[in-house]
């Protein structure tokens, strides 16, 4: 390919693309990478008195995908009419760092000062230092601090941070108590790590969940499961017989003074509570997560309903906004709250004002029992009402406050899904500050 010299007063020769016919004028020769220019190149401007420049080097490819011939670019402008071109292979000049007040006019000190961008780039950890989330790795669902030091938390589960040293201790205990039961192992782990509830009891159930998580990720081996004498099928048959024997005759009039709440914990009584709620409550029942209390409601010697309490929800925007403004921390909100997880009155019980009467008694009772059993003074109660089914009249009659509505999201594992209907969020305050804050009128959240 031969390019003739140009007699035009413009600077440089004219290069024509063999396929498109486009041209590019100037001292910068741009050539498509698909059609490399080989051989001898001559660029000259005789009318301006510029000495022709001859180049025989192969063009190089720039960062934008075009081929550039560096040898055709003069180091300095040839005349005043030459345009200023920013070369793509040259990095932009950085502004020199300002000397610190203590350095004075020392030029050597100015050279040692590095820009903030360079400092930030050098302070970033390399890819090998950042732990990756992989299956079977305890970092997959945890937050990490100061990796590699063996002191910072590696695994965060059930509200506790576990360091590498503590995980090593758990692994050694699992090997030591290989022949014992899983309950014995969880008790020993709680004692060694001093993992206790506020009332001083060992957090065995939470510890067993952590042990199962570590076994699932193949970080340790737990003792084999031992068969429970009373299996679930036997318990279900006993509960079903109790439900079959319950009196379902209609109840229209009761003596409110005879309403009693009987707390159930373990044994046949709790099994009866589980079966009744599973059969007659529209949400059914599986298990309460965390702290919980269950009560059977009796009136004139007959069971008329059931009510259950458990730990509050992890995050509710309308509730947290009010409590955070009062000085509560997020951990304090979850620690000092109680959720009314289930409230059931049997369908054959038709007594006006009975539900609000039961809610008043249950609220005062659970406040005393919760503090006595868990050594934590509750600050508020919460519940969620499906407004497509109920209006929440009994809660409002028992002095509960409407604070907002949920957005229908539920959390299963690490996934949030908008798979539920929006529900009304109601609070019952024990703390005087919360009661005063809820008593003030709020836009869109006044009592119906």
Image: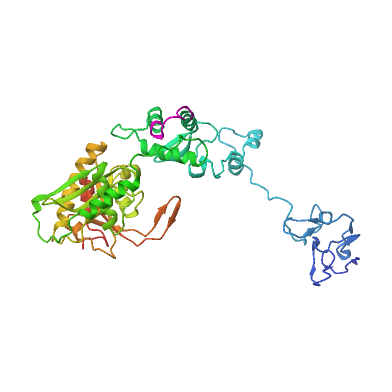
Q: Residue at x 30, y 31 (%)?
A: 200
Question: Can residue 376 be seen in the rendering of this structure?
Answer: yes
Residue 178 on the magenta span? yes
Placement of the N terminus among the 4 image quadrants = bottom right
Question: Can residue 339 be seen in the rendering of this structure?
Answer: no
Foreground of the two, 444 or 256: 256
Foreground of the two, 416 or 277: 277
Q: Which residues are magenta?
A: 175-184
Residue 415 on the magenta span? no
Foreground of the two, 416 or 287: 287
Q: Residue at x 38, y 34 (%)?
A: 183
Foreground of the two, 15 or 65: 65
Question: Does residue 144 appear to the left or right of 183 in the view shown?
Answer: right
Q: Which quadrant of the figure has residue 346?
A: bottom left
Q: Position of residue 389 (x, y in %)?
A: 27, 64
Q: As displayed, is residue 122 above or below residue 446?
A: above
Question: Does residue 122 appear to the left or right of 286 in the view shown?
Answer: right
Q: As displayed, is residue 87 above or below residue 206?
A: below
Q: Position of residue 259 (x, y in %)?
A: 12, 50
Placement of the C terminus among the 4 image quadrants = bottom left
Q: Position of residue 171 (x, y in %)?
A: 49, 31
Q: Position of residue 353 (x, y in %)?
A: 13, 59
Q: Residue at x 31, y 57 (%)?
A: 283
Q: Residue at x 62, y 34 (%)?
A: 105
């Amino acid at each position: 390919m031969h390019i003739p010299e140009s007699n035009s007063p413009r600077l440089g020769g004219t290069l024509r693309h063999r396929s498109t016919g486009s041209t590019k004028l100037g001292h910068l020769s741009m050539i498509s990478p698909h059609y490399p220019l080989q051989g001898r190149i001559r660029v000259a401007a005789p009318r301006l008195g510029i000495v022709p420049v001859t180049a025989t080097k192969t063009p190089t490819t720039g960062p934008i995908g075009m081929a550039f011939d560096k040898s055709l670019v003069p180091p300095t402008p040839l005349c005043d009419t030459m345009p200023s071109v920013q070369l793509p292979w040259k990095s932009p000049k950085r502004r020199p760092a300002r000397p610190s007040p203590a350095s004075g006019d020392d030029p050597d000190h100015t050279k040692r000062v590095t820009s903030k961008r360079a400092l930030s780039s050098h302070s970033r950890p390399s890819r090998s230092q950042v732990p990756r989330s992989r299956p079977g790795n305890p970092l997959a669902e945890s937050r990490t601090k100061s990796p590699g030091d063996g002191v910072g938390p590696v695994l965060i589960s059930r509200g506790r941070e576990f360091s590498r040293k503590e995980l090593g201790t758990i692994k050694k205990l699992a090997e030591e108590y290989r022949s014992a039961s899983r309950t014995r192992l969880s008790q020993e782990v709680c004692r060694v790590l001093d993992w206790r509830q506020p009332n001083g009891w060992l957090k065995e159930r939470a510890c067993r969940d952590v042990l199962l998580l570590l076994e699932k990720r193949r970080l340790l081996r737990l003792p084999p499961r031992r068969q429970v004498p009373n299996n679930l099928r036997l318990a279900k048959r006993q509960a079903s017989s109790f439900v079959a024997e319950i009196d379902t005759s209609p109840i229209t009039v009761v003596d409110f003074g005879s309403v009693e709440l009987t707390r159930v914990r373990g044994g046949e009584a709790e099994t009866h509570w589980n079966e009744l709620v599973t059969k007659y409550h529209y949400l059914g029942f599986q298990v309460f997560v965390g702290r919980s209390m269950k009560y059977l409601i009796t009136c004139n010697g007959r069971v008329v309903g059931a009510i259950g309490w458990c730990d509050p929800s992890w995050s509710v925007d309308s509730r947290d906004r009010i409590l955070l403004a009062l000085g509560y921390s997020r951990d304090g909100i979850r620690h000092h709250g109680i959720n009314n997880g289930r409230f059931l009155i049997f369908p054959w019980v038709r007594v006006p004002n009975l539900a609000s009467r039961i809610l008043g008694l249950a609220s005062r009772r659970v406040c005393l029992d919760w503090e006595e059993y868990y050594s934590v003074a509750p600050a508020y109660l919460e519940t969620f009402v499906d407004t497509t089914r109920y209006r929440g009249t009994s809660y409002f009659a028992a002095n509960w406050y409407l604070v907002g509505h949920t957005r229908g999201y539920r959390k299963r594992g690490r996934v949030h899904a908008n798979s539920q209907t929006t529900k009304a969020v109601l609070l019952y305050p024990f703390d005087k500050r919360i009661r005063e804050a809820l008593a003030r009128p709020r836009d869109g959240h006044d009592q119906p």
